[in-house]
Image (spheres, rainbow, N blue to C red):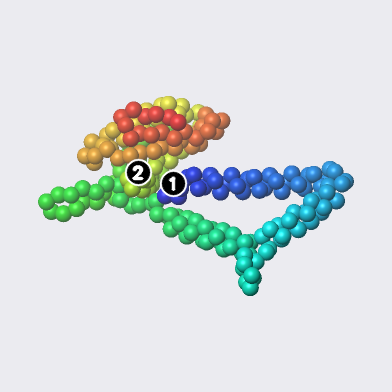
Amino acid sequence: MNNTNRALNRTVLAIAGLVSLAIGASIVWMLVDPNARTIWRSTGGTVTSWADDVFGRPLWAGTTLSLAAVIALVVALVLVVLFVSFAFRQGGGSTGTVLRARSDDGEISIDTAIPAALLEERLADVPGVASLTVSAYRVRRQPTLKLTVNCRRGAAPRTVVDAIDDAVVRLEGALGARPIVYAQLTGGFRSRIHSPIRVDTSTTTARSS
């Protein structure tokens, strides 16, 4: 969980997947069809000649600058901007402060360790909970707690979710503010045969998704 643009991630993955699929399909085609290599070479030569004729021409007389060079430069600049933006976003989501409050004496910061200790103490007696990991991130400029709950074999997710909901409500009372909390249930027999459950406990009622 970080500030990386989710749409950008999915776009990159989709493009990489399509390229991999095309390469795999081409390899299978060449292995299955004896004439595939001949067709590939003929088509490749035609496309190369066409591309060289269209993109390889100088844009105006007396210069070697071609349309292909301009396109390559624009693509390179776009990739550099995307990579720089991606690099600056990495690691920017984690934070050690859950809440900040101002008083007459100054600003008070609540470290992640405090809600982590309170939640661990509250969930320690829940039969289905084996362990709990608490971390904090900034999501849309808002501090957000992420709970990773490792469930015991045979644990009922609904029971664990209700316990987390109750623990978060009590955490709100202790902190004096309502934190945004996302919980992910892992482990356990039922969790192994189903996809991990993420619970938005930003309200008093937990909702599985």
The mark nearer the N terminus, 2 or 1, is: 1
Residue placed at 82% from the left, 54% from the top? 41
Q: Does residue 83 appear in this view?
A: no
Give residue 14's mark: none
Looking at the picture, tell me which residue is in the foreground, 113 or 137.
137
Give the answer, above or below, for where 46 lies relative to 177: below
Q: Amino acid at mark 2?
A: Thr
Q: Does residue 157 appear in this view?
A: yes
Residue placed at 36% from the left, 43% from the top? 145
Residue 37: percent from left, percent from top: 84, 51
Residue 167: percent from left, percent from top: 32, 34
Residue placed at 62% from the left, 67% from the top? 60
Q: Cα distance, mark 2 to mark 1?
A: 10 Å
What secondary structure is found at the residue carrying circle 1?
loop
Q: Are marks 2 and 1 in contact (CB under 8 Å)?
A: yes
Give the answer, above or below, for where 166 lies relative to 76: above
Q: Amino acid at mark 1?
A: Met
State the image quarter where residue 133 is shown: top left
> Residue beneath label 2, please?
144
Give residue 1's mark: 1
Position of 68 with respect to 196 (left or right) is: right
- The residue sitting at the front extreme is 61
Give the answer, above or below, for where 87 lies relative to 118: below
Residue 203: percent from left, percent from top: 32, 31
Quarter that holds the C terminus: top left
What secondary structure is found at the residue carrying circle 2?
strand
- The residue sitting at the left extreme is 104
- The residue sitting at the right extreme is 34
User: In the rendered picture of this protein, how many numbered marks are placed on residues?
Assistant: 2
Residue placed at 35% from the left, 52% from the top? 95
Looking at the picture, tell me which residue is in the foreground, 134 or 123.
134
Q: Callout 2: 10 Å neighbours few (<14), some, many (20+)?
A: many
